[in-house]
Amino acid sequence: MTHGPNRSRLPIAATAVLAAAHFIACDAGGPDYSMLLTPDSLTATAPDIFQARFETSKGDFVIEVHREWSPNGADRFYNLVSNGFYDDARFFRVVSGFMAQFGIHGDPEVTAAWLGQNIPDDPVLQSNTRGFVSYAMGGPNTRTTQIFINFGDNSRLDAMGFSPFAQVVEGMDVVDAIYSGYGDFPPNGNGPAGGQIYSRGNEYLSADFPYLDFVRRATIVSE
C-alpha cells in the first residue's frame, strides 16, 4: 500500500521473491492440495449469501458472506474455502485493536501458484467496522487470498478501497482471543517476515513463531 496514513497500520499483502525449492504437503502423505495448484480452474460463482465456519486453535467462528457487497471478493473466497485453502493457515499478523490477518497457505508451492492471481476491486458498499472481513492488498486490483477481520472501527480503510465482503456472525469472542503477542510485521512489531512466510510457509512459522493461532479447517456450512 502506498497511500493513506500510518502505513504500518494497513492490512497490506506481503511481497517476496520465492525460494526455488518448495514442498508439497501431499507428497509426504498430508492433505491433497492439487486443486489449489491450478487457480484458473477455481472460478465457481458464489451463492448470494453463504456462511463459512472456521475451526481454529482458539475455537470456532462463523462468517457470513453477502455476494452483493463484494462480488469478486465473495467468489474468490468461496472457491478458496471450498478447496481447503485456509486449512492450517496461521493468523500471522494480529494487531490488538486493529485486525487479524491470515490467508497465506502453509505450502509455499500453493502460495506460489496464487501469486499474481489478482481479482478486480469491488466498490466499497460496507464499512470496515468491528467484525467485518476484507481482503488485504498492496494497491488497486491486487487482492488475492489474504483476508483480515476488523477488531474495531477501521472505517478509515473504506476510502482506501478495502471492500468488506463478509461479517463474523458467531464467535467474535474467539476472534478477539487470537494470539496477538507478536504484533505487526517488522520493524513495527515482532511478527513474522512476509518474505519468509512466502518462501518457507508453515515450516518457518511453526519453528520461529510457535504461539501463532491457526485455522484447523474452514468449510462452507450453508448456502
Image (cartoon, grey):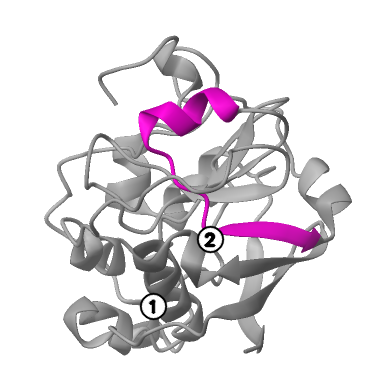
Instruction: Report which residue position mark 1 lands on.
Output: 25
At 58% from the left edge and 40% from the top edge, which residue is drawn? 127
Q: Is residue 51 above or below residue 156?
A: below
Q: Quarter of the image containing the N terminus? A: top left
> Farthest residue in the right direction?
173
Q: Which residues are magenta?
A: 155-169
Would you say 107 lies left or right of 86 here? left
Q: Is residue 193 visible in this depiction of the protein?
A: yes
Position above or below: 102 against 215? above
How many discs appear?
2
Is residue 12 found inside the magenta-colored segment of the image? no
Instruction: Please tell me whether residue 63 is drawn above or below residue 188 in the rendered image.
Output: below
* Lateral position of residue 20 relative to residue 90, left or right: left
Q: Residues within 10 Å of mark 2 (few under 14, many from 20)?
A: many
Residue named by callout 2: 89
Given residues 91 and 143, the one toward you in this image is 143
What is the secondary structure assignment of the residue under circle 1?
A: helix
Q: Residues within 10 Å of mark 1 (few under 14, many from 20)?
A: some
SS at circle 2: loop
Looking at numbered disc 2 in the image, what kind of residue is underneath it?
Ala
The residue most toward the left is: 20
Q: Residue at x 84, y 59 (%)?
A: 171
